[in-house]
Image (tube, rainbow, N blue to C red):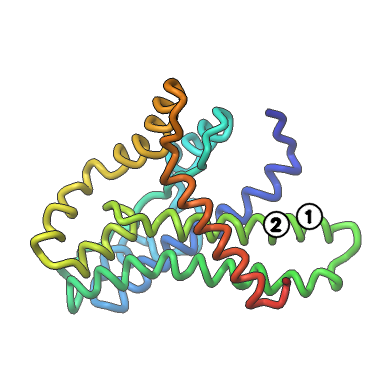
């Protein structure tokens, strides 16, 4: 797979903005709801270096890209939140968790709306700006959809823990230490194992791709691009 400097230039900026705003949103909402842990540690920041995880943000997506994985994913350094310090811990956890994906959807909406401003861009940079906007739309929607999978420590898992009755929330919350292993299993190992036996076990990736495509089309319709 040949990756040019141009390819890197139109993917890195949208990715950094997406993960930085996602993580900063978690910390900001937590601070507003009573927990200043992230604020004190300098994680309510729009400096991407505060949020980049060398493995999760750089190496893992790169490995998946080079291995032709059916679905790319990665993660940033999680913003530290003391949910017990929130004014209303259980409901607060839901709002803090939703802040990240909601911010990504807003960024995707902004990128889609910005397509209308492309005629104003200088001719020699219009294509580069267009590719950045297109990738920003895709990255932000993928990040929002992926993070809403109901598996802790993903945002969707914490939303589920906050909304489900205790009899279901408690066992789900106990999966958090194993969440990333579960994701790697169902997104990478299971499909690879199934392919050895001629079986398509790539169900989660198919659901994610379908959901992502639907949301992208909806955002394009809402912004008058379709």
Count every numbered label the image shows and give the total: 2
**Residue at 78% over, 74% down:** 117
- Tag of residue 128: 1
The answer to whether residue 48 is left or right of residue 113 is left
Q: Quadrant of the C terminus?
A: bottom right
Above or below, 15 relative to 221: above
Residue 218 coordinates in the image, percent (x, y): 59, 70
Q: Residue at x 91, y 62 (%)?
A: 123
Per the image, the residue denoted by label 2 is: 132
- Report helix, strand or loop for mark 1: helix
**Residue at the farthest right position:** 123
Residue lying furthest front: 198
Q: Are marks 2 and 1 in contact (CB under 8 Å)?
A: yes
Q: In the figure, is residue 194 to the left or right of 129? A: left
From mark 2 to mark 1, how far is it between C-alphas? 6 Å
Q: Residue 152 at x, y = what percent? A: 27, 52
Secondary structure of the residue carrying tag 2 is helix
**Relative vertical location of residue 70 with respect to residue 103 in this rendering, above or below:** above
User: What is the crowding at mark 2: few (fewer than 14 residues within 10 Å), some, or many (at least 20)?
Assistant: many
x%, y% of residue 213? Answer: 58, 58
Furthest residue in direction top, as rendered: 196
Q: Which mark is residue 71?
A: none
Left or right? Give the position of 148 relative to 18: left
Residue 189 screen position, x and y as percent: 38, 30
Please give the name of the residue rendered at 15% of the width and 49% of the height, measured from the top-left corner: 174
């Amino acid at each position: 797979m040949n990756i040019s400097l141009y390819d890197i230039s139109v993917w890195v900026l949208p990715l950094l903005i997406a993960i930085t705003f996602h993580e900063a949103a978690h910390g900001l909402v937590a601070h507003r709801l009573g927990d200043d842990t992230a604020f004190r540690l300098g994680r309510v920041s729009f400096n991407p270096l505060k949020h980049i995880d060398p493995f999760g943000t750089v190496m893992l997506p790169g490995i998946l890209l080079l291995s032709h994985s059916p679905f790319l994913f990665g993660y940033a350094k999680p913003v530290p939140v003391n949910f017990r310090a929130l004014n209303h811990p259980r409901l607060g956890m839901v709002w803090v968790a939703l802040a990240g994906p909601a911010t990504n959807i807003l960024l995707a909406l902004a990128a889609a709306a910005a397509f209308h401003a492309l005629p104003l861009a200088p001719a020699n940079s219009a294509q580069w700006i267009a590719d950045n906007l297109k990738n920003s739309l895709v990255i932000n929607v993928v990040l929002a959809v992926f993070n809403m999978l109901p598996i802790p420590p993903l945002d969707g898992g914490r939303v589920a823990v906050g909304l489900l009755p205790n009899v279901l929330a408690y066992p789900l919350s106990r999966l958090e230490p194993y969440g990333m292993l579960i994701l790697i299993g169902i997104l990478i190992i299971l499909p690879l194992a199934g392919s050895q036996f001629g079986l398509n076990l790539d169900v989660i990736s198919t659901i994610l791709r379908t959901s992502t495509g639907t949301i992208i089309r909806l955002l394009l319709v809402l912004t008058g691009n379709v």
